[in-house]
């Protein structure tokens, strides 16, 4: 077969699949690199194409950024379904190849419309977003290995958000930054943004080669011992499009134990525990009547998939995704826009593309620190709901303070920048997994999580698509008005709307979510008797 060398041996379920997860991680990192490498230079790229007025550049840059995610969302279900028929590995390799080709199209694009085609092309061919999450679950059959395995992909995503901006910013327009090595009359003078795309493409090519030769096919009915009857009567789960937040948020599938974080989340249903602890001697008839009544109650509850609380929380996720994505789009534009020393909030910070690329990479490191250390500590200390209230109410502050950076003296500029980035990451990185936890808590039944995940993913995808163009348009309008705070404070208002939703969210008082590090969760599993596994995050209303 063209895309899959024959797998000659089966995997040992008792051993941790280190090599397979490493190869899968090499493929996984391609998406955040492709998604984020363009951020530092997207605005400059549009200015280079000279499309529209200069004030329109932020809008067109937003269209470029949104195109990849939009096209990816449109075709994600198709690729997930196709992986059921032809295998996960083939779809994975094909998607990574499509991403690589799209980067080359973008690098060689001579005008805006070819560049836009490259972004759409890459998004349409990238079916990795749902397939990889499914492959992790299929690779790991030992419950003791799940915490470490499911923590790998969010960590890899974070690494991609560090590498992507660094490559995109540092190697953009090399004839100006490295004039002794790159001639202005040569290839890189004609295509000033080709080099970062070539570097990213080379990295993807390496992951494609590794996947082709060493990655196992994980589809349970496409193993060496499988028959055609297995495939025709498969019980394999079709990959779903995960819910996504902003640039730093790893996609998460609510139907699995995935919250886009490195940590394990256990949702305890106290009513279920109380029922399990009660032992009442009833007659056979009474037991039958009670069972019939319970089943009727469960059926009635299970019929309500999109309850009011679920819809309110999904709307909150959409609002969060929108304003978080506007931050990611506005930040590099504001940093590079010419500094205006006149009165009022006008202009940007006047930094170079290379400086912005490094700053965005440091921003990724800050996000990694918040997610890995601060989030589990704060969630364990305060609890999920109090922490969610704090970060949701405080989130607008991250947008309000950004325009004031233009008023800082040069010697305080970088201190101000990294302070603003830490404030933003504290609110944004913590809010995302909390929203996913609350949505899962609110689900009437664990059997409905697939449908709820679909609505959450669609809502988030729509908000991600419109966020960057709208924010870009408002930034251009603010430039014409000599008021650069317009776009930032518009996003702050949207974040305030998100905070206004808090009184409408009905807390599930009988459920308690506990956030535990992957290491602690693994230790708790080690203490369980052989063959048992702690019950994790299966919300039910009874």
Image (cartoon, rainbow, N blue to C red):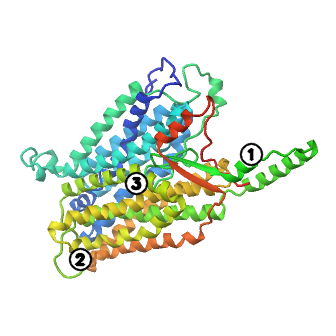
Q: Residue 469 sits in which quadrant? A: bottom left
Q: Nearer the viewer, residue 188 or 200?
A: 200
- Tell me the SS state at disc 3: helix
Q: Which residue is mark 1?
A: 276
Question: Which residue is situated farthest in the bottom direction here?
Answer: 343
The numbered mark, 1 or 3, whose residue comes first in the sequence reads: 1
Query: In this image, 203 relative to 14: left or right?
Result: left
Pair 3/2: label in front:
3
**Residue at point 23%, 70% (across, down):** 348
Label 1: how many Cα within 10 Å (few below 14, some 14–19, many 20+):
few
Query: In this image, 526 relative to 338: left or right?
Result: right
Residue 492 image point, x, y percent: 40, 72
Task: Find the distance from the CA under tag 3 to the CA under tag 2.
Answer: 35 Å
Residue 318 image point, x, y percent: 50, 62
Label 2: how many Cα within 10 Å (few below 14, some 14–19, many 20+):
many
Question: Which residue is situated farthest in the left direction here?
Answer: 180
Q: Which residue is mark 2?
A: 346
**Residue at point 31%, 61% (across, down):** 421
The label shown at residue 374 is: 3
- Tell me the SS state at disc 2: loop
Q: Nearer the viewer, residue 241 or 447?
A: 447
Residue 357 image point, x, y percent: 24, 54
- Tell me the SS state at disc 1: helix
Q: Residue 23 sits in which quadrant? A: top left
Q: Nearer the viewer, residue 315 or 521?
A: 521
Q: Is residue 129 above or below residue 532?
A: below
Residue 26 image point, x, y percent: 37, 36
Query: In this image, 284 relative to 219: left or right?
Result: right
């Amino acid at each position: 077969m063209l895309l899959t060398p024959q797998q000659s041996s089966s995997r040992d379920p008792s051993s941790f699949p280190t090599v397979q997860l490493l190869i899968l991680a090499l493929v996984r990192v391609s998406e955040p690199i492709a998604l984020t490498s363009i951020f530092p230079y997207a605005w400059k790229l549009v200015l280079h194409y000279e499309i529209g007025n200069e004030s329109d550049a932020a809008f067109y840059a937003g269209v470029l950024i949104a195109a990849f995610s939009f096209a990816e969302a449109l075709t994600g279900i198709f690729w997930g379904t196709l992986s059921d028929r032809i295998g996960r590995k083939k779809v994975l390799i094909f998607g990574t190849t499509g991403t690589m080709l799209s980067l080359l199209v973008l690098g060689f694009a001579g005008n805006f419309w070819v560049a836009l085609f490259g972004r759409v092309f890459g998004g349409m061919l990238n079916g990795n977003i749902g397939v990889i999450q499914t492959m992790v679950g299929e690779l790991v059959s030992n419950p003791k290995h799940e915490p470490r395995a499911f923590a790998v992909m969010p960590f890899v995503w974070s690494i991609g958000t560090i590498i992507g901006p660094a490559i995109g910013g540092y190697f953009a327009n090399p004839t100006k930054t490295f004039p002794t090595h790159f001639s202005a009359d040569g290839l890189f003078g004609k295509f000033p943004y080709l080099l970062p795309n070539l570097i990213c493409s080379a990295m993807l090519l390496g992951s494609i080669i590794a996947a082709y030769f060493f990655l196992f096919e994980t589809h349970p009915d496409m193993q060496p011992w499988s028959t055609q009857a297995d495939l025709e009567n498969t019980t394999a789960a079709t990959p779903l499009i995960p819910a996504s937040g902003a640039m730093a948020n790893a996609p998460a599938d609510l139907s699995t134990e995935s919250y886009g974080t490195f940590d394990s989340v256990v949702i305890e249903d106290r009513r279920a525990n109380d029922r399990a602890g009660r032992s009442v001697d009833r007659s056979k008839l009474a037991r039958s009547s009670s069972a019939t009544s319970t089943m009727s109650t469960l059926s009635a509850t299970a019929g309500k998939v999109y309850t009011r609380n679920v819809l309110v929380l999904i709307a909150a996720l959409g609002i969060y995704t929108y304003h978080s994505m506007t931050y990611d789009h506005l930040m590099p534009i504001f940093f590079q826009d010419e500094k205006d020393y006149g009165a009022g909030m006008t202009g940007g910070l006047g930094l170079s593309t290379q400086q912005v690329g490094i700053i965005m990479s440091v921003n990724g490191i800050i996000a990694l620190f918040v997610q890995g250390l601060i989030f589990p500590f704060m969630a364990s200390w305060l609890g999920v709901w109090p922490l969610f209230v704090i970060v949701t109410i405080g989130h607008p502050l991250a947008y309000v303070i950004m325009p004031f950076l233009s008023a800082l003296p040069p010697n305080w500029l970088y201190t101000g920048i990294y302070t603003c980035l830490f404030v933003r990451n504290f609110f944004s990185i913590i809010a995302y997994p909390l929203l996913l936890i609350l949505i899962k808590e609110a689900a009437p039944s664990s059997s409905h999580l697939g449908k709820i995940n679909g609505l959450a993913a669609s809502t988030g995808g729509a908000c991600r698509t419109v966020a960057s163009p709208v924010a870009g348009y408002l930034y251009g309008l603010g430039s014409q008005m000599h008021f650069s705070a317009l776009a930032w404070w518009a996003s702050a208002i949207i974040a305030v709307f998100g905070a206004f939703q808090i009184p409408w969210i009905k807390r599930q008082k009988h459920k308690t979510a506990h956030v535990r590090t992957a290491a602690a969760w693994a230790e708790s599993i080690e203490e369980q008797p052989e063959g048992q596994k702690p019950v994790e995050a299966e919300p039910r209303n009874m």
